[in-house]
Image (tube, rainbow, N blue to C red):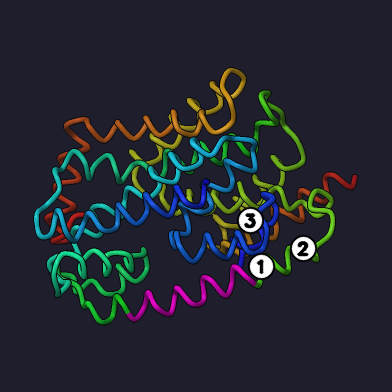
Amino acid sequence: MTIAGCAAVTAAIKATGPVALGGRELPTWFTSVVILLSPALLAALVATQAFAEGDRLALEADTVGVAAGGLVFWLSRSIVGCVLVAAAATALVRAI
Amino acid sequence: MSFGILADEAGFSDLAAVIMSAIVFAGSAQFTAISILAAGGGAGAAVAAATLMNSRFLPMSAAVGPSFSGGPLRRAAKGQAVVDHSWALSSRGDGSFDQALLLGASAIAYCTWIGGTAVGAVWGDALGDPDALGLDAIFPAFFFGLLLNELRSRRARGVAALGTALALALVPFTPPGVPVLVASLAALVGLTRRARAEAQERQEAEGEPR
């Protein structure tokens, strides 16, 4: 269900650009909002996954892990390092 | 490969993960959708969030449009090849795009993306207890890295903070997935006069909408 839905909307969005809009510039207000959609969505995804367990907010092992991963990315710009450190830190906190 | 492992985490079968990579072919949207499913959200919320994530392809593919040859159907088919890095790679900097380079770069990316998903999905099975290994932290950490890359402007940082606040405020009251969707409203900050003026400047400076 989800897969089919994602495939359909992705294909539709990518096809609309070259055909319906070919050459015309999109209105500035639209582009301006689209640019900001990624930070809004990503921030919400990080926050809900790092701080929420079901329908309550909680500081848990994965919160520590994500913070550690973010620090590594900030210092090294390596997404692989960020993910590995996040997993390792989470596992470590859980093991203690 | 990371997508295969994470899809495995979210309860997708190996085959489902590979099929998704093959027919959706939009990394960030795929990650968004499966992470919402993994958190217990419904298919509707997952698809809606993936759609918002994909909305950037609209200005991107519209910019490429004039550089594609062929009739409407062929241009629509070529539009499917638009992904972030091949789009950026094939941009000539004057608003036009190298069609052959874009299609070629995407073809290579497509094969490695599907192959990587398969390897990750199979490897994910062999990893053992995901919680003990801290694998549940991989999703948010991955998104955190992407987010830090996006926070170059003050406005982007403000929108991220607003999105975080909106999402966390809603967690206790709404089903999983909904807070993320509502948080996307933070992007409406882009409607302010100053944000639009800056987007306009950027468009003119780059010679193409982004």
B165 sits to left or right of B125: left
B180 sits to left or right of B172: left
Specify the amino acid type for callout 1.
Gly
- Which residue does the image show at 44% across and 74% down from the upper left? B109
Residue B73, horizontal then vertical, whole percent:
20, 66
- Which residue does the image show at 24% across and 42% down from the upper left? A32
Is residue B108 highlighted in magenta? yes
Quadrant placement of the C terminus of chain B: bottom left
Question: Label 3, label 2: how many angstroms apart (C-alpha)?
Answer: 11 Å
Disc 3 designates what residue? B7
Q: Give the dominant element type of the magenta stretch: helix, strand or loop.
A: helix
Disc 2 designates what residue? B125
Disc 1 designates what residue? B120
Q: Are marks 3 and 1 on the same chain?
A: yes
- Which residue does the image show at 37% across and 30% down from the upper left? B185
Q: Which mark is on residue A80?
A: none
Relative to B10, residue A40 above or below: above
Which stretch is magenta?
Answer: B104-118
Q: Are marks 3 and 1 in contact (CB under 8 Å)?
A: yes
